[in-house]
Image (tube, grey):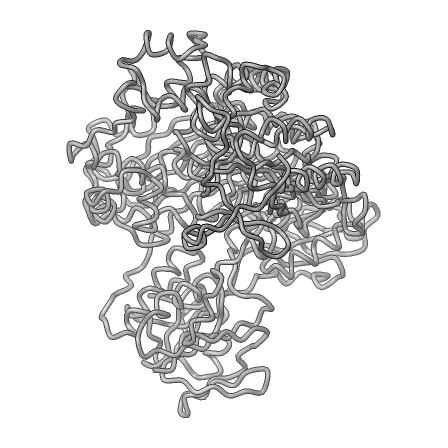
Amino acid sequence: MKIVVIGHGMVGHKCIESLADAEGVEITVLCEEPRPAYDRVHLSEYFSGRSAEDLSLVPPGFFERGNVALKLNARAVSIDRAARQVTVSTGETLAYDKLVLATGSYPFVPPVPGRERDGCFVYRTIEDLDAMRAFSARSKRGVVVGGGLLGLECAKALRDLGLETHVVEFAPRLMAVQVDDAGARMLRGRIEELGVRVHTGRNTLEIVDGDEGMHRMRFADGTHLDTDMIVFSAGIRPRDELARGAGLELGARGGIAIDAACRSSDPDIYAIGECASWNGQVYGLVAPGYDMARTAARSLLGEAPRFEGADLSTKLKLMGVDVASIGDAHGQTAGSRAYAFLDEQNQLYKKIVVSGDGKRLLGAVLVGDAADYGPLLQTMLNAVPLPKAPEGLILPASDGKPAGLGVDALPDSAQICSCNNVTKGALCGAVRDGAADIGSLKARTGAGTTCGGCLPLVTQVMKAEMKRQGLVVNNHLCEHFAYSRQELFHLVKVGRIRTFAELIARHGKGLGCDICKPVAASVFASTYNEFVLKREHASLQDSNDYFLGNIQKDGTYSVVPRMPGGEVTPDGLIAVGQVAKKFGLYTKITGGQRVDLFGARVDQLPSIWEELIAAGFETGHAYGKSLRTVKSCVGSTWCRYGVDDSVGFAIRLENRYKGLRAPHKIKFGVSGCTRECAEAQGKDVGLIATDKGWNLYVCGNGGMKPRHAELLASDLDAETAVSYIDRFLMFYVRTADRLQRTSTWRENLEGGLDYLKSVVLDDHLGIAAELEADMQHVVDAYACEWKNAVTDPETRKRFRHFVNSDAQDANVQFVPERGQIRPATLEERSKNIIPIARIA
């Protein structure tokens, strides 16, 4: 079956994903933009440091599977229904058996005289944003026409561009469709505190030349506003011109009329997303579009699904302010009544609308705190009976008891994740099959992997089901400690415990094991930063830390001297080369911009390090669960694209954090511009320079399970960036589980990125100063471990193969390869190859 999909936006791609693995299906996708589908929901983050590649929804290799062809810069010109053909702007004609229209919408621009002047834009595509960015470079003030969802997102974009930002709205309040008067007043106050000026009840008559800016907007009330740049974001209209030309039936207010299977008036043509009209309704949200996409895909594959409309509830964060609207937010249902809670001190507003008999929830408005959005939405959608005092659903909890109904009241059919159509029943089934943490639950069900807004509710469902199954969330470290690593950390810190003997005597039992001992060693190092090979700590270390080197497959060790930021002098390189040559070591440049020396026997390690230290090097901690490397590009010092000194900042960061022990290894990247040559967005901590400062990314991973780092903060000066990194790293050190990378820690962190931001940026827990002080103690207590080792005779004694002999390990054998050495294979060893001689 040949399927042609016209439009490759978010909804079009969701439909293609649902069809791509089906047998006997050939899909051709027409995309009029120069790039594949990307995340328009988070489009404003393009101005906060995310690139077009970051926003892409298409995984690598998706269009290499053979049955899906993507044509970029290809606009569908017309549809010949009789011949079942689509004519493309390139002149090509495509035949189809079934056609899917996913053409989306276009921005509505009010018919105001002057709207086509230079410096007037719409806010829809990455190309629109590129044009806005270029024009903003010569602008001081920007105006957004439209105070709805898209308008306020656009206002954030202008603010991120550094412009004095104004919002002009025709209605008497912001977000007139979603929130009521009280909620809009609270929202307006919060936004104006951020420096955005709001003008409601303004009808723009014309745009002419301005005195204090390029443009002057004249309003019907006789006032005016001068500005340099205007962005229209006043709603959308369905793109149904292809359907009109083909004679398809349209909705009363535009849009392609569809039935419950998302078929148009032609049974061979489907329409999904913002171009479709179901029962006269055009849906401008992504979740209903995804439902349509899945419905159309299943229908094309011979099933009989039904799209039965969609709830228009929504939750979002507008310039840092949580806003949510559920169902009948304005109480338009006959006989309904409302309960409202207003907290002006904390700038919170919550309202619920209930049925006349008080038994059903009809709608809600939340401003300032949308944590209750998930439970309230599911309560409404599933007609869950309300308690006798429904106001308890929005009032602050008292006596430590939660006020809500809880997830137990929801039926299994409740849709918890609307983006990926994951029900409560599916989540509970995954828990019963062994998914006992958020990371594994996301991997099995897909819940929370798109927008992430459902994760708090997903977590509640998981914990409730685990309790129902009698599963104990046992976070004990091992049989010797009935505590998690996080709890053990606090016991050490609060109790000022410095030795394992004291720790197990006060809080454990038995003698300890190879699980709890290295964890305790790491906690002691993170807290006090004492020499890990002190007599009381040495026996706690694992093999790598015990010998301060990474043990390799043949029993030898690698040596990695620290080269902060990847910078090394010619004399330094010569010294490393001389050491490698003298001791006959294999040398390789690592991905972290270091020189790795392989093949060192344990008895050679002190001598090797003695010479490296004499040449000015320190331990690179390649053996430890600690900071490994800070990778950098050459930045503004050498590169013509660089906007800041990435090498200098990388060196500063590496020298600051080089002594930090953590639950797992940590890697940094610092890029001097958004071309991102240091791959900072694949690191635990990444910094990217922009013309406004440093953008800080966290919790990335480029290893076995790659994870793109997330933007924590933008436009930072160096001092603020360092303080945020201090807080982030120490919060991770305190709260992560044993051997948990920052990426996995973040995936399982309740509250996700928003919670992490509240702790690190907003000091929600009131511990920011403490975290910074703890980090400063680690920095002040730093000492090179190998320098301590080679200067202490007792420590040097441990570097030998045999406790009762100075003999070397005869099993260490090498063969030559490409001018260097490598370990001999088992087959080569069996031939009794004589080991290569080298100077000891």
Q: Position of residue 504 (x, y in %)?
A: 33, 12
Q: Is residue 401 above or below residue 326?
A: above
Query: Which is nearer the eye, 662 or 774?
Result: 662
Residue 613 visible (yes or no): yes
Q: Position of residue 16 (x, y in %)?
A: 40, 68
Q: Is residue 742 above or below residue 680?
A: above
Image quadrant where residue 656 sits: top right
Q: Residue at x 37, y 58 (%)?
A: 288
Q: Residue at x 58, y 55 (%)?
A: 817
Count how many numbered circles sit on residues in the image: 0
Say left or right for 200 vs 802.
right
Image quadrant where residue 518 sits: top left
Q: Which residue is drawn at 75% across and 44% down?
A: 635
Residue 168 visible (yes or no): no
Query: Which is nearer the eye, 121 or 30?
Result: 30
Q: In which quarter of the image is the N terminus?
A: bottom left
Say left or right for 799 vs 119.
left
Residue farthest right in this picture? 211
Q: In which quarter of the image is the C terminus?
A: top right
Query: Which is nearer the eye, 37 or 238?
Result: 37
Residue farthest bottom in this picture? 83
Q: Where is residue 816 in the image (x, y as percent from the top left)?
A: 58, 53
Say left or right for 576 vs 183.
right
Q: Is residue 35 above or below residue 138?
A: below
Q: Is residue 285 above or below residue 194?
A: below
Image quadrant where residue 18 sits: bottom left
Q: Where is residue 463 in the image (x, y as percent from the top left)?
A: 26, 34
Q: Which residue is drawn at 47% across and 60% down?
A: 59
Say left or right for 808 vs 337.
right
